[in-house]
């Protein structure tokens, strides 16, 4: 075995093929569409539950921990997040492919002050006195709502 590679029994496991590829099914040149092919692959991964299957197959392997700062809670993902996320994804996929168990946890950097400022603006609160009158528990609940506002977009994109 080469160092840092999975055992041969793990490496040679078979994966289900979604359909037999025929020569007439292969598209070339202008007929080939990267977005359509990507959609097909994503659908296949969804159907196979590929991410959970990869975790199952690496269970018991050495853990690989990758600390990553979570996304911002007060805005939508943009190109900068996608570029950095792609590099981070390459690192964790490589670790998994070289025989490590890599659990990914999605978290949030809630940036307390921006979340609080946005909540104050949304509720037309003018500062500490208004927050105390409303009740800190209610204010915190409103802040949680701001944090979760874009969560689905972040989870889908990142």
Image (cartoon, helix red, strand yellow):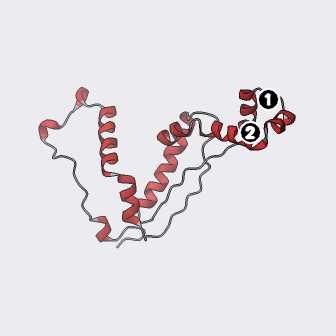
Q: Quadrant of residue 79?
A: top right
Does residue 6 appear left or right of residue 110 in this picture? left
Disc ID at residue 125: 1
Name which residue lies at 55% across and 40% down: 151
Residue 94 drawn above or below residue 80: below
Q: Judge whether residue 73 can be spotted in this image.
A: no
Instruction: Give neighbour class at mark 2: few <14, some 14-19, many 20+ (Cα, 10 Å).
Output: some
Under tag 1, what secondary structure? Answer: loop
Q: In this view, does 36 lie to the left or right of 94?
A: left
User: Circle 2 sits on which residue?
Assistant: 139
Q: Where is residue 99 in the image (x, y as percent from the top left)?
A: 41, 66
The tag earlier along the polypeptide, 2 or 1, is: 1
Residue at point 59%, 56% (across, down):
67
User: Does the residue at mark 2 contact the one at mark 1 (Cβ under 8 Å)?
Assistant: yes
**Residue in front for this viewpoint, 86 or 14:** 14
Classed neighbour count for the residue bearing mark 1: other residues with Cα under 10 Å, few (<14), some (14–19), many (≥20): some
Q: Where is residue 132 in the image (x, y as percent from the top left)?
A: 83, 39
Q: Position of residue 5 (x, y in %)?
A: 39, 67
């Amino acid at each position: 075995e080469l160092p840092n590679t999975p055992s041969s029994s793990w490496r040679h496991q078979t994966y289900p093929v979604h359909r037999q590829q025929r020569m007439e099914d292969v598209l070339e040149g202008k007929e080939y569409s990267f977005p359509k092919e990507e959609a097909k692959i994503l659908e296949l991964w969804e159907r196979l539950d590929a991410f959970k299957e990869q975790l199952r197959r690496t269970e018991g392997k050495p853990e690989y921990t990758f600390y990553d700062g979570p996304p911002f809670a007060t805005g939508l993902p943009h190109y900068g997040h996608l570029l950095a996320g792609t590099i981070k994804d390459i690192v964790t996929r490589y670790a998994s492919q070289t025989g490590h168990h890599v659990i990914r946890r999605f978290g949030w950097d809630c940036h307390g002050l921006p979340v609080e400022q946005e909540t104050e603006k949304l509720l037309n609160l003018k500062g500490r006195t208004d927050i105390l009158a409303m009740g800190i528990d209610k204010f915190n609940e409103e802040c949680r709502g701001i944090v979760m506002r874009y969560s689905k977009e972040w989870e889908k994109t990142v």
